[in-house]
Amino acid sequence: MKLFLDRNKTLLPRIDVVVLLTRILTFASVCWFAVFGTYEQSDNVLIYALISSYTMLIMMFSAGMMGKFDLKLAYLGTIIYDLIFLPLFVLYTGGMDSSLYLFFYLTVSVAAYVLVFPVAATIVVILTASYIGLVMHQLTVDNLFGFSIRIGLLWIYFLALSYVSEYMHKSERRLMKLFNTLNMRTSELEKSQAQLEMTYENTRVLASFMEPDDVVREVMRIMGNTLGYSSYMMILRNRQGEYYYRARCMVSRTSYSLRPLDISRNELLTRVANGQEAIRINDLTSRDDYQTLSKDSKSALIVPMAFHNYASGLLVAESNETQSFSERDEQLLIVVARSAGLAMENAELLRRTEELSIIDELTNSYNYRFFVQKFQEEKKRAVRYNLPLSIIMIDIDWFKKLNDSFGHEIGNIVLKQLASVVEKCIRDVDIFARYGGEEFVVILPQTPLSEAQVIGERIRSQVEAMIIDTVTKGTVQITVSIGVSSYPENGRSEEELVTVADQALYRAKDSGKNLVCVS
């Protein structure tokens, strides 16, 4: 049975010192009565026994206050002692005429403050019954009203104090609950703030990566180490709208191998990417528009990597528990996704910029600057390892006449078609570049003169057979003149090889065009 109100963790004032002072005051009253009071000589033993026991009671309460034992036991001992001692004290000091009945209010105050209401009420009932029993023989018609007032005020005081104490106790419980919630929210906020700062710092680092693969690895690291997801993935979308897995992690195993994604089984991903709005799925068991990374996944968070109103991909986190992702998780992953989208876009722009610096925009072949750089590298390699190296110079026959007759737009179409044919006639290791105007050059690593001549003839015949649809001005056909030179037969420097190939090219033109000439 519960006796005490829970005062271990309390915001209310402690009354330990007050109770101790009242006990000392009561003790002083006992001592005063022992010295100056009127009582039978035979009661000396009882008086001194009361003084001794009260001294022990005060010492016990003081020890409880100092933590020597449970203070609740000291309170209980004090109240029980009052039930025995106070009626005797009132009896020996005049009964009905004694004003020491006021000490009952001290006991009632302590009982109402520290005991639960039923127990405290029982204490008051015992005190009332004891007082009535002590003064019953002194009751008369004249003093009955005063006696009733004493009893009534004692109960009114007890009930009022009990009500106030209970109200304060309930208010304290609500306040303590509020404080606990506030402490918990503060702890969560501090944790969230630390995680947010770490996330922002990591996303800031993302901007420094210039390679898409580095961006992908950093994003996966953030999702795993910083955000603490157990199953997560990055899905990318190419310009044709096709989706594929770029990286995925499940049970601490990360894979960066590309894998196509069946969008027919993942319509939800399309909606998130097109709508550019994150979505939290609290329960995946009833979904048929999303294919989970893990068969045990029960909830998911999907965030688009949106940049400039286009979602280049998606970041997805999964959990084995339902309703696992909060609004805070969504906000943090949105920050990462936006930074990832920006970083991927920057990496793509850098790649395109680098390509534009070495790619001829019209024909999509390499430009002259790149040709010079690669030719020097291949020449050094050929010298170091004693390997053959050839180049082919290609020039369109009658190109000026074609431009004058059909216009420069048709000339541009011809250049594009020619580049397309040449790329189909050469190997992947060969380097095809636009030398200038309608002139092109092909670097053929580890290729002797005889093989280069065969490749040149293949190009010439394929171009001759090509029919170009100009759309607006019908079809046209072209031919090319080709010159070939090789290392080391035709020279040891790049300039010599280019000069020899160029001379062979003009010899082909002078010989009637649509020819392949070697040095």
Image (cartoon, grey):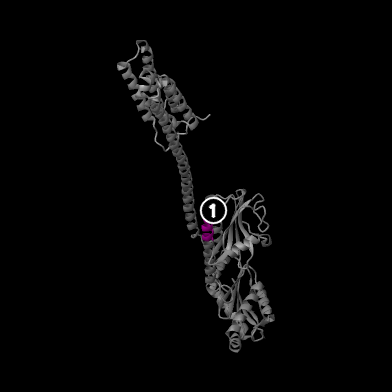
Q: Position of residue 266 (x, y in %)?
A: 66, 60
Q: Position of residue 293 (x, y in %)?
A: 64, 53
Asked whether 361 or 199 is in front, the reply is: 199
- Toward which corner of the image does residue 401 lie, by quadrant? bottom right
Against 348, is 134 above or below? above
Residue at the image position 57 percent from the left and 67 percent from the top: 378
Q: Secondary structure at mark 1?
A: helix
Looking at this rendering, what residue extends furthest in the front direction? 141
Against 337, is 473 above or below? below
Secondary structure mainly formed by the magenta segment: helix
- Toward which corner of the image does residue 491 lie, by quadrant? bottom right
Against 483, is 81 above or below? above
Looking at this rendering, what residue extends furthest in the right direction? 465
Looking at this rendering, what residue extends furthest in the top direction? 42
Asked whether 4 or 116 is in front, the reply is: 116
478 relative position to 131: left or right: right
**Residue 155 visible from this viewpoint:** yes
Q: Which residues are magenta?
A: 329-340
